[in-house]
Amino acid sequence: MMTSQKKPKEVFQQFGDPGRGYVGQYNLNNAFRRPVVLWEDKVLTVDIYAMPGTKMYGHIYCPQCARNGRQSLLTVREEAKEMRLEPDAMPARVAKQLGMSYEELARYLELDNVEGLRGGLSIGKIGCTWEEDPTARRSFGLATCQWSVVIDNNIARNVPR
């Protein structure tokens, strides 16, 4: 007579320590990047997810909304915007404009080492879609945040809406 024991489910840490984050045949550690982007005098991080065989997408907090004390998370999808990620590129233009070495930039961002800086990012025109006043719900967009940029090689520049 055979008895079957229930096996405990395996839990996978998707991002984090080396040697973890495996689901099926994909190493999810390699699917996540956090490139640094310079906008005006601010260094922004963009969380980019790029699984093999799927469209890339990213999350970014609107820095204009942050100035006004709000946290507005924007999602950018490759289906809707032109996006280019160079996973092994270093943000040379960011470091140069800030007058920092890669090591100084990594320390400034509280990273363990310069490898955390890797990721060249370019995204076509994106803009914040959140309302300036969260209590006013207007579908026609007159009160939306006016932050609108193009990201080119890790540098975000303002563009008209």
Image (cartoon, helix red, strand yellow):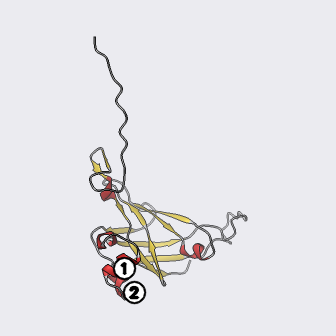
Q: Which mark is residue 98?
A: 2
Q: What's the residue type where badge 2 is placed?
A: Leu
Q: Which residue is mark 1?
A: 105
Report if residue 153 is visible in the image.
no
Which of the two marks, 1 or 2, is nearer to us in this view?
1
Asked whether 126 or 121 is in front, the reply is: 121
Q: Quadrant of residue 35?
A: bottom left
Q: Are marks 1 and 2 in contact (CB under 8 Å)?
A: yes
In the rendered picture of this protein, how many numbered marks are placed on residues?
2
Quadrant where the image shows the C terminus: bottom right
Q: Position of residue 16 (x, y in %)?
A: 35, 57
Q: Residues within 10 Å of mark 2 (few under 14, many from 20)?
A: few
Q: Quadrant of the N terminus?
A: top left
Query: Which element is circle 1 on?
Result: helix
Q: Amino acid at mark 1?
A: Leu
Which residue appears farthest toward the top when viewing the image? 1
- Residue 94 at x, y percent in the picture: 37, 82
Judge the density around disc 1: few (<14), some (14-19), many (≥20) Cα neighbours within 10 Å: many
Task: Give how far across and how far down residue 2 sits, in percent.
Answer: 28, 14
- Left or right of 108 on screen, residue 26: left
Residue ID at (35%, 54%): 54
User: In the drawing, does residue 138 fall left or right of residue 51?
Assistant: right
Q: Is residue 139 left or right of residue 10?
A: right
Q: Residue at x 66, y 71 (%)?
A: 132
Residue 6 image-quadrant placement: top left
